[in-house]
Each structure stands twice: as structure tokens, then as C-alpha cells.
Amino acid sequence: MSDKQPLFQSARQQGYLLCVDCEKLHLLTQEGQHCDRCGARLHSRIPNSMTLSWASLIAAILLFLPANLLPVMTFKSFGQGEPNTILGGIIHLLEQDMLLIGLIVLIASIVVPALKMIAMIILLCTVQFRLHTNLRQKALMFRIVEWIGRWSMLDIFVIGILVALVQLGNIAHIEGNDGATAFAVVVLLTMFSAIVFDTRMIWDSSVADLATAKREQKDNS
Ligand SMILES: [Zn+2]
């Protein structure tokens, strides 16, 4: 092995830490202080990141059941209509030959949240059990989860806008139900789980292993 520094050396090992809010590089000695550019508290790793991330993810998974089993909204037209669950609404849309809208609702309300939660489980297991496969892919996966987060409230916005707009007395009337609350909380908890998850931990175990391997190689030679 050459005397060059290993390819994997974390910023922390080199004496630096990054402000996660504005991405300014600071010295590791400033741990716990405030960023001089944006004022955020500086941490080389977010404290209790794993615990907070797991806890909010598990809560989100549990709430995903009522979000899908309870009705999300009731649309009443001329006094007729009954509460609809997400899946019930999708089936209703498909029956009305609104295939495209049905598919969009299916993807936005069920497929994307489920995939996001699966992605977070994979990321958390990677760090928890020190799995080293495709770390780059996992970092990319996290960025996708984070990026999707901002679009996840779309359904709730739609229900909110409909409830506010369509109040035509007996002619048409829409009200939100408990399923919508559960769904909103699922989205918030998954977002929170991703926010408190420190991506730098994905690389930590492999950096540690590389250091151990290097030390062993040195001892052997
Ligand atoms: Zn900052």
C-alpha cells in the first residue's frame, strides 16, 4: 500500500466539520458552537441521530395503517356520499374511467410514502448493522428521499383546498376525515426521520473498517 492518505478519510478524521444548514466548513474544535455564517449549532454528527430517526420512522410505519384504512375525506353531493379511504377513492376514480388521476393518487399516496419508508429502513439498517454494500447508491437514495419529501404534502393540500372551496351547502360538500390527519402525520414523521438522519454515518463504519484494515496491514508488515 502506498503512503498516500486513504481514499476514505472523513472530514472529522481530518479535523473538520460541516454546518449541515449552510454547508460551511468549520474546524472540529468548534463542535457544539454556533456557525458563524448561519447561526446553526455545529455537530460533526447530529446527536442521537439514529434513535430519533428510528423512532419517527417506526411511528410513521405504524400510522401508515390508519392512514390507509380510515377514510380520508367525505364528498357529499346533494346529500349523498360516504367517507372514502385512499384506496377506495382510487378504485372510485378507476371505475369512473379516470385512469390517469387514479394512478397519480396511487403513486402519490401509497407507492411513494411506502418506498420512502423502505428506503429509510435500508439506510438505518446500513448504519445500524454496518453494511457496506453500495454506499454511494445509498447516499443517492437518501438524496432522492429528501427531495421527494417536499412534494409529499400534495395530497393534504388538495384535501385542504377542496374542503375550503367546495362548501356549497346541500349541493356539494367535502370534509376531511381522520385518515387525512394520520396521513399528514405519516408524511411529517417520515420527513423528520430523514432530516435527523445524519448521512455522514453511512460512511463512518467503512472509514473505521478501512482504518482497522490499514492498522492490521501495518502490524503484519
Ligand atoms: Zn451554517
Image (cartoon, grey):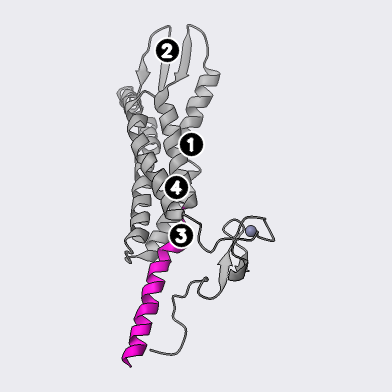
- Name the residue tied to disc 1: 153
N-terminal of the pair, mark 1 or mark 4, is 1
Q: Is residue 215 magenta?
A: yes
Closer to the observer: label 1 or label 4?
4
Q: Quadrant of the C terminus?
A: bottom left
Sequence-earlier tag: 2 or 4: 2
Q: Residues within 10 Å of mark 3 (few under 14, many from 20)?
A: many
Q: Which quadrant of the frame does ligand 1 lie within?
A: bottom right
Report the magenta residues as a range.
Answer: 197-221
Asked if marks 4 and 3 touch (Cβ < 8 Å), the reply is: no
Q: Which SS does the magenta portion mostly show?
A: helix
**Whether label 2 touches label 1, CB < 8 Å:** no
Q: Amino acid at mark 3?
A: Thr
Local secondary structure at mark 4 = helix
Q: Position of residue 5 (x, y in %)?
A: 47, 83
Q: Give the crowd class for mark 2: few <14, some 14-19, many >=20 residues within 10 Å.
A: many
Rounded to the nearest angstrom, the CA distance separating label 2 from label 1 is 24 Å
Task: Give the structural element (helix, strand or loop) at label 3.
Answer: loop
**Residue that appears at 37% across and 12% down:** 81
Residue depicted at 48% across the width and 36% down the height = 153
Cα–Cα span, label 3 and label 2: 46 Å
| CB contact under 8 Å: marks 1 and 4 | no
State the mark number for residue 199.
Answer: 3
